[in-house]
Image (cartoon, rainbow, N blue to C red):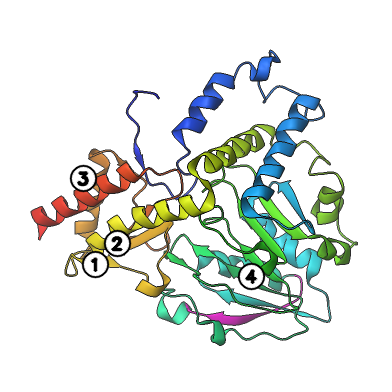
Amino acid sequence: MSTNKRAYNFNAGPSALPLEVLERAQKELVNYNGTGMSIMEMSHRSKEYDEVHNNAINRLKKILSVPDNYDVLFLQGGASLQFTMVPMNFLTKDQTASYVLTGSWSEKAYKEAKLFGNAVVAASTKENGYRNIPKLDEIQFNENDAYVHITSNNTIYGTQWKQFPNTGNVPLVADMSSDIMSRPFDVSQFGIIYAGAQKNLGPSGVTIVIIRKDLIEKANTELPTMLKYKTHADKNSLYNTPPTFGIYMLGEVLRWVEEQGGLEAIQKRNEEKAKYIYDVIDESNGFYRGHAEPGSRSLMNITFRLADEELEKQFLAEAKAAGFVGLNGHRSVGGCRASTYNAVPVEACIALRDFMYEFQKKHQ
């Protein structure tokens, strides 16, 4: 283990990566597996890279218990491109797509869908400042909808779905960019899951899509080649040059998840980490003010405010001086945010808890 001091990294994304993964990549950076080349240098058509590619796919399928009737794709363009690809492929002229609005990213997905067809709001908590997730019985959609879209975790507002809606025969589509691989869930409940890698899966540059095979066959065929899911499914995500180093890193992060004991162990640790910080907020008598309602709190992004902006600026400045990185809230809402993704160690959350206690003592 490296003795170099690591920052307390609470960045929202790109975010912390497991130290063990970084050190393994460091050892293999110049000469991967005796090839005399870096992963970044070798052909994506080589048998050495093919093994890396398929191992990453298979590890992801194993950890998430992905059923056989789903494909796992490695794409590019982030979740933002998926905001477009989903309606392009599946929103037909005679159907409606229903979007549940729980924050900025679901708003962006909804905005893109409206460019391609009839998209409607199935439920929204915007009037409440996105402080909570809608109740399941508040979600309104029709049985002939093309799909229902949700965002499983909201990085900016700090809310997270605890239970997913049952949409029956209507495909449920989920942007899971910020909490995939943080807890067990039933993949078969969804038609499509997509996620940027830069929170819990690896470095930025790779986008995961888990998609039911029957949906691929039903998708719009009159699209540019690169915007069809079928193009990538048919070629095992090797139609064009993939982000090879990012996929290698993703595979190593997945190996690390297995080494930690899988999703059950990861979830337990994430709950422990979040509790340290939420407890400070709840016990502060209003000195720290959590944004999310308790029943909708995210385990990944803990959002809070202080009494006034000047005190917040002082908090963030002192935190930065103490070695904490990434505690600023999103530029669109301000405030403070601690992103406690999988790779953020328990020790960092304990250190933040202690800093918050001390800051309150000095400034109350």
Q: Earlier in the sequence, mark 3 or mark 4?
A: 4
Q: CA distance from mark 1 to mark 3?
A: 21 Å
Q: CA distance from mark 3 to mark 4?
A: 39 Å
On screen, residue 214 above or below 168: above
Q: Secondary structure at mark 2?
A: helix
Q: Secondary structure at mark 1?
A: helix
Image point 75% across, 78% down: which residue? 169
Q: Is residue 170 left or right of residue 272?
A: right
Q: Which residue is mark 1?
A: 282
Q: Which mark is residue 278?
A: 2
> Is residue 330 something that shows in the picture?
no
What is the three-letter code of the residue carrying label 2? Tyr
Choose mark 4 or mark 2, whichever is in front. Answer: 2
Tell me the quarter of the image containing the N terminus.
Answer: top left
Q: Earlier in the sequence, mark 1 or mark 3?
A: 1
Q: Secondary structure at mark 3?
A: helix
Tell me the quarter of the image containing the C terminus.
Answer: bottom left
Range shown magenta: 116-125
- Residue 47 in the image: x percent, y percent? 80, 26
Q: CA distance from mark 4 to mark 1?
A: 36 Å
